[in-house]
Image (spheres, rainbow, N blue to C red):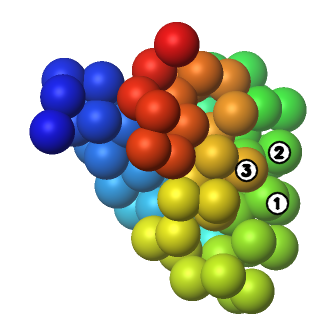
């Protein structure tokens, strides 16, 4: 497992946790985006994709990761470009 894979896994865990907190109204979308270091609109896109793809394919599917986190440049099986 390479360093990029580890970082991607951490990002996914942080995103999932922050999305859950946001859905429970503990934090705002703006706060969650700031904690991830992305624009609020990016957080909103990731959340939509995560929910759409996650329900259909399972949240740990490589396709879901690719769809939810397109800005990272990390893909399933290929590592980061």
Q: Secondary structure at mark 2?
A: helix
Q: Which residue is disc 2 drawn over? A: 45
Q: Do the residues bearing badges 2 and 1 touch, measured as CB atoms within 8 Å? A: yes
Return the residue at label 3: 67
**Picture coordinates of residue 24 (x, y %)?**
57, 76
Give the mark toward the camera: 2 or 3: 3
Q: Residues within 10 Å of mark 1 (few under 14, many from 20)?
A: some
Circles 2 and 3: CB atoms closer than 8 Å: no
The x, y position of residue 12, in whole percent, is 42, 50
Identify the residue at image location x=44%, y=44%.
77
Q: Secondary structure at mark 3?
A: helix
Horizontal side, residue 40 vs residue 58: left or right: right
Q: Which residue is mark 1?
A: 48
| Position above or below: 66 against 3 | below
CB contact under 8 Å: marks 1 and 3: no
Cα separation, mark 2 vs mark 3, equals 10 Å
Residue 20 visible, this angle:
no
The residue closer to the viewer here, 11 or 31, is 11
Please name the residue shown 79% across and 59% down the image: 49
Location of the N terminus by quadrant is top left
Q: Nearer the viewer, mark 1 or mark 3?
A: 3
Q: Position of residue 64 (x, y in %)?
A: 64, 62
> Badge 3: few (under 14), some or many (20 or more) residues near its Cα, within 10 Å?
some
Q: Nearer the viewer, residue 34 or 26?
A: 34
Q: Is residue 38 above or below residue 44?
A: above
Real-space CA distance between mark 1 and mark 3, rounded to the nearest whole angstrom: 10 Å
């Amino acid at each position: 497992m390479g360093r990029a894979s580890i970082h991607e896994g951490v990002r996914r865990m942080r995103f999932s946790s922050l999305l859950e907190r946001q859905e429970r109204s503990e934090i705002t979308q703006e706060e969650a985006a700031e904690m991830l270091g992305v624009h609020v609109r990016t957080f909103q896109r990731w959340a939509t994709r995560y929910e759409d793809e996650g329900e259909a394919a399972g949240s740990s599917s490589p396709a879901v990761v690719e769809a939810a986190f397109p800005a990272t440049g990390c893909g399933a099986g290929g590592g980061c470009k």
